[in-house]
Image (cartoon, rainbow, N blue to C red):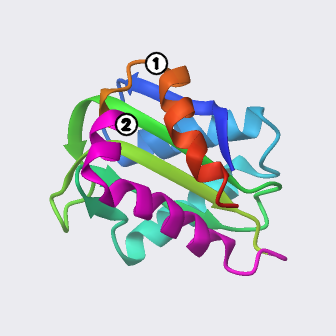
Amino acid sequence: MIKQNLIFINQPFRNRSEVISFIASKADEANLLTDQHEFIKTVLRRESEISTSIGYAIAIPHGKTDAVKEAFIAYATVKKPFEWDSDTKDRVKAIFLIGVPKKNTDKLHLKAISEVSKKLINDEFRKKLFDCETNEDAFSLLNSINREF
């Protein structure tokens, strides 16, 4: 589910809308979406319900919609941490964006969130991930999550 072409290290994003829109455009270019705008709308709607900032300077926004053709997990880090939302005031520097088709997925988005979260609880894994300087380094580390699917 984690795609190497959807890993973006040290980006200049300043807010969650920029991150989500950028990654959605890249997922669309990778032919993973049928409707980029519907996917963005779904993710932002989910964000409006409750923040996906989980602490540790990480957010895991996600969307389950028919606009997703193939499930994916994207990962991005930012040059300068920013406030994810005004409710929690959490500052975020790493974002996992999860897209899952609405049909025939049997809670796949929950499994994806769970697998990512299990890795991120580990301080050593998280430090190694934050220290990655290239997309390739990050993919090499994150690829272990793919084995769980």
x and y percentages locating residue 126 in the rendered image:
31, 45
Is residue 114 covered in magenta? Answer: yes
| Viewer-nearest residue: 77 or 146 | 146
Query: Label 1 amino acid?
Result: Thr
Q: Residues within 10 Å of mark 1 (few under 14, many from 20)?
A: few
| Residue 60 visible in rendering | no
Instruction: Please state the extent of the stretch shown in magenta in the rendering.
Output: 103-129
Residue 134 badge: 1
**Splitting the image into 4 quarters, where does residue 87 fall?**
bottom left
x and y percentages locating residue 75 in the rendered image:
50, 41
**Splitting the image into 4 quarters, where does residue 127 fall?**
top left
Q: Give the mark nearer the N terminus: 1 vs 2.
A: 2
x and y percentages locating residue 98 in the rendered image:
58, 56
Tell me which residue sits at (45%, 36%) in the image: 76
Is residue 69 covered in magenta? Answer: no
Residue that sits furthest to the top in the current view: 134
Tell me which residue sits at (50%, 28%) in the image: 8
Rendered view: 140 above or below 34 = above
Q: Residues within 10 Å of mark 2 (few under 14, many from 20)?
A: some
Secondary structure beneath label 1: loop
Query: Label 2 amino acid?
Result: Leu
x and y percentages locating residue 81 in the rendered image:
22, 37
Magenta stretch, main secondary structure, is: helix
Tell me which residue sits at (35%, 24%) in the image: 12
Between the residue at mark 1 and the residue at mark 2, the CA separation in whole angstroms equals: 10 Å
